[in-house]
Image (spheres, helix red, strand yellow):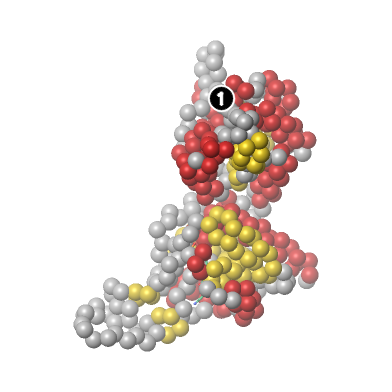
Amino acid sequence: MNLVLGVGGGIAAYKAAELARALLERGHNVQVVMTRAARQFVRPLTFAALTGREVITDLFPRGSQPALASATEHIRLAQECELLVVAPATADLLARFAHGLADEFLTALYLAFPGPVVLAPAMNANMWRHPATQANVETLRQRGHLIVEPEEGPLACGMVGPGRLAELSRIVQAVEAAAARRRDLEGECVLVTAGPTLEPLDPVRFISNRSSGKMGYALAEAALARGARVILISGPVHLPPPPGAELVRVETAAEMRQAVLDRLSEAGIVIKAAAVADYHLADVPRQKRKKSAARWSLELDPTPDILAEIGQIKGDRILVGFAAETENLIAEARRKLLAKNCDMVVANRVEEAFGADDNEVTLLLRTGETIELGRASKRELADRILDAVLRLRLSLHAAR
Ligand code: PMT
């Protein structure tokens, strides 16, 4: 694979030479890009000798008359590159990535590159713990980048704490994981439902729930990044649709059901992350109810259970449901897995899942397997859920 190894300006820059070698040994083509600060720590010649390629250091090569090609070199490399790994990613570099600065070659390349990014931060412990750095890391994590957390231990500055560049084997592992996910959904169509539904009580009032759409949109984004065509059927949310997704906006459970049935034949994987209202007012009055001192009692009817209905007609599709519970999470999720004929149910707790950027989920599979995905950003969990979907499909096909 064509990798770019970005080297930031920290003491750990010398370890990037070992990393370059480890990546070359695994058969990757490695193009090294160094920041201005990195060149204070290690000479480009070290990397050039290891990789057999000129190291890129400047947007405009010094000493020579800037040629037209040099003005667009970062774009050319962004098109050729399949994965960007940055080690060490300094506090300054993380801040520039997070805020979209394009003030030197590596930061301009980062902005021009739409593919997978692996970041291995290394810095002084206080710089790592600083809320500004943590906020930048969180922004980058939410963007779907893999962060290889620094390790605890004695640092070059004399302090002991978190900030040491992760073991090279962990960085290589992260690169291989990101590379494996790269385009493994090419040729697939994934249908995702997201957000809440909104059930009117009259022309101004409605019942809804606290779903923000973040989980469903993260799944759509992850599937797109892995090469899938994505149909995103979304209740009302305040999120921008992931570029490239075929967005179908709906409001009510009935509209969501119709949209899912209309598009079902196109999809091989269906993931129902939406929080569909379970009850609605069947006959919505056309006029606004006037306020009065009298009690207003409503009789609500159940909405159609879309997941259960799809479970009956899914054929060979992989059907993933979610279960959001306040108690008996795993037992309830298992009950839904069987009752709705799903291949997988993603179990999460109501109090942790709704509206948050992170989540903690357990997967229950048709095969009887239970997988703890742990706590992570919804974007990272989306990738882990898709990893599990692909593995499950393989094992179901093998069992046939
Ligand atoms: O949107 P976020 O703020 O990021 O929050 C994410 C989430 C909490 C909404 C998500 O992680 C989640 O758990 N979604 C499912 C919420 C839910 O409605 O769970 P449930 O246990 O009530 O429903 C079980 C499954 O049946 C779900 O896949 C749901 O989409 C589906 N369902 C439910 C009712 C119904 N009438 N039709 C359905 O298809």
Point out residue 81 in the picture as x, y percentages from the top left corner: 62, 37
Point out residue 350 in the picture as x, y percentages from the top left corner: 51, 69
Q: Residues within 10 Å of mark 1 (few under 14, many from 20)?
A: some
- Which corner quadrant of the image does residue 10 belong to? top right
Q: Secondary structure at mark 1?
A: loop
- Which corner quadrant of the image does residue 19 belong to? top right
Whether residue 226 is visible to the viewer of this picture, yes or no, is: yes
In-image side of 114 versus 27 (left or right): left
Q: Nearer the viewer, residue 98 or 62?
A: 98
Q: Quadrant of the C terminus?
A: bottom right
Q: Nearer the viewer, residue 175 or 31?
A: 175
In-image side of 13 versus 236 (left or right): right
Q: Nearer the viewer, residue 56 or 296?
A: 296
Q: Disc 1 designates what residue?
A: 37
The answer to whether residue 17 is above or below residue 161 is above
Q: Residue at x 62, y 44 (%)?
A: 149
In-image side of 19 versus 120 (left or right): right
- Residue type, mark 1 in image: Ala
Q: Residue furthest top?
A: 63
Point out residue 278 in the picture as x, y percentages from the top left corner: 46, 78
The answer to whether residue 312 is above or below residue 83 is below
Image mark count: 1
Q: Residue at x 40, y 80 (%)?
A: 280
Q: Quadrant of the N terminus?
A: top right
The answer to whether residue 261 is above or below residue 9 is below
Q: Residue at x 73, y 22 (%)?
A: 49
